[in-house]
Image (cartoon, grey):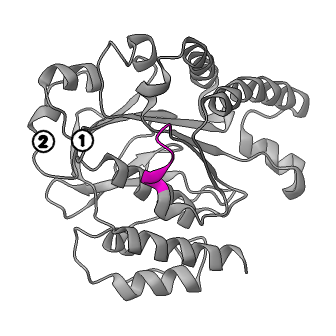
């Protein structure tokens, strides 16, 4: 039974979930039916569903804020890998939707960079808060802006005598609040060929890693080809959360995750996660959601946001 107090919005989203909630544990609808929300004192939820556990009975959460549902608090940056057809794009789409249905636009913004034109995110294009960019110069400018923004946040926090984004927003009030932003960069290896892009990415990663949760930025990088020739170790080492769907070789698994195993994952959507704070790797399954169903959820979110 859907607990109607769990979601940030009410009627439109709840009705859609209830309509599809009997479609089985392989469905993202059943995940939204069963998921709990880890809402903090300021109204935000920053615990998102990775998928179903290996036995498909329970949910696995990626916690960007506090420990939740038996899982630790994880790192603010995440590397996602997986060969073509493994379910990587489905996972990213599910994650974006999960962010959007559990937070109002003033609590979580989403920015997507995709050198392939954004086709993998086509079913999400109606989300008000979502922007998909495909131009490398725009991406470089944005990454440079992250570094400068974090520096500005630090000075503002010092002036206001606060330590976190949420404490800052409590002082500033609703009209001046700073948003927590989830930045998804798909097919990152394509852009890392550009030395200037690489330098700006490393600068942003360094700024986020130094300030952690308080920065308000969370980077999620994805690639189908985790190889040192296209994904440098100096980038990989920043990522405290590493998630992989099926990879072609154990060498790639060791490079992406730090352990073997991703080469042995079985079907579409089978995932292996090494998350900061967890004592062992976690296997789970990415729930299925069709393009049409994703579009239906986007419409429901838009109805809720337009109220």
| Residue 49 visible within the image | yes
Q: Are marks 2 and 1 in contact (CB under 8 Å)?
A: yes
What residue do we see at 45% from left, 40% from top? 73
Q: Which mark is residue 245?
A: 1
What residue span does the magenta drawing correspond to? 115-121
- Residue 283: quadrant of the picture: top left
Count residues near mark 2 (Cα–Cα under 10 Å), then give few for <14, some for 14-19, many for 20+.
some
Residue 21: x %, y % from top left? 33, 81
Local SS, label 2 = loop
Residue 4: x %, y % from top left? 51, 81
Q: Quadrant of the C terminus?
A: bottom right
Please give left or right for residue 147 compared with residue 27 in the image: right
The residue identified by callout 2 is 265
Q: Quadrant of the N terminus?
A: bottom left
What residue do we see at 91% from left, 28% from top? 159
Local SS, label 1 = loop
| Residue 276 visible within the image | no
What residue do we see at 45% from left, 45% from top? 63
N-term-proximal mark, 2 vs 1: 1
Residue 196: x %, y % from top left? 61, 14
Q: Is residue 94 above or below residue 248?
A: below
Count residues near mark 1 (Cα–Cα under 10 Å), then give few for <14, some for 14-19, many for 20+.
many
Q: Is residue 76 above or below residue 287?
A: above
Please give left or right for residue 41 compared with residue 24 in the image: right
Instruction: Decide which of 156, 134 is in the foreground and name it.
Output: 134
User: What's the distance in space between the residues labelled 2 and 1, CA to CA?
Assistant: 7 Å
């Amino acid at each position: 039974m859907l607990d109607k107090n769990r979601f940030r919005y009410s009627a439109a989203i709840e009705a859609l979930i209830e309509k599809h909630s009997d479609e089985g544990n392989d469905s993202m609808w059943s995940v939204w039916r069963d998921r709990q929300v880890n809402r903090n004192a300021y109204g935000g939820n920053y615990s998102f569903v990775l998928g179903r556990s290996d036995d498909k009975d329970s949910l696995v959460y990626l916690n960007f804020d506090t420990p939740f549902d038996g899982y630790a608090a994880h790192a603010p940056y995440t590397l996602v890998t997986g060969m073509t057809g493994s379910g990587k794009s489905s996972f990213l789409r599910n994650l974006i939707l999960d962010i959007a249905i559990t937070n109002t636009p003033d609590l979580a913004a989403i920015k997507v960079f995709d050198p392939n034109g954004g086709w993998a995110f086509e079913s999400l294009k109606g989300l008000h808060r979502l922007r998909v960019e495909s131009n490398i110069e725009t991406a470089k400018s944005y990454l440079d802006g992250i570094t400068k923004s974090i520096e500005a946040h630090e000075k503002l926090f010092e002036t206001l005598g606060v330590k976190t984004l949420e404490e800052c927003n409590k002082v500033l009030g609703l009209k001046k609040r700073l948003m927590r932003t989830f930045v998804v960069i798909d097919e990152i290896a394509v852009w890392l060929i550009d030395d200037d892009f690489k330098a700006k990415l490393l600068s942003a990663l360094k700024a986020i890693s130094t300030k952690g949760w308080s920065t308000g930025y969370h980077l999620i990088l994805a690639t189908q080809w985790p190889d040192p020739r296209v994904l440098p170790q100096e980038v990989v080492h920043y990522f405290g959360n590493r998630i992989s769907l099926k990879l072609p070789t154990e060498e790639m698994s060791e490079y992406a995750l730090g352990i073997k195993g991703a080469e042995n994952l079985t079907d579409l959507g089978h995932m292996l996660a090494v998350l900061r704070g967890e004592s062992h790797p976690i296997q789970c399954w990415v729930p299925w959601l069709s393009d049409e169903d994703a579009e239906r959820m986007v419409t429901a979110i838009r109805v809720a946001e337009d109220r």
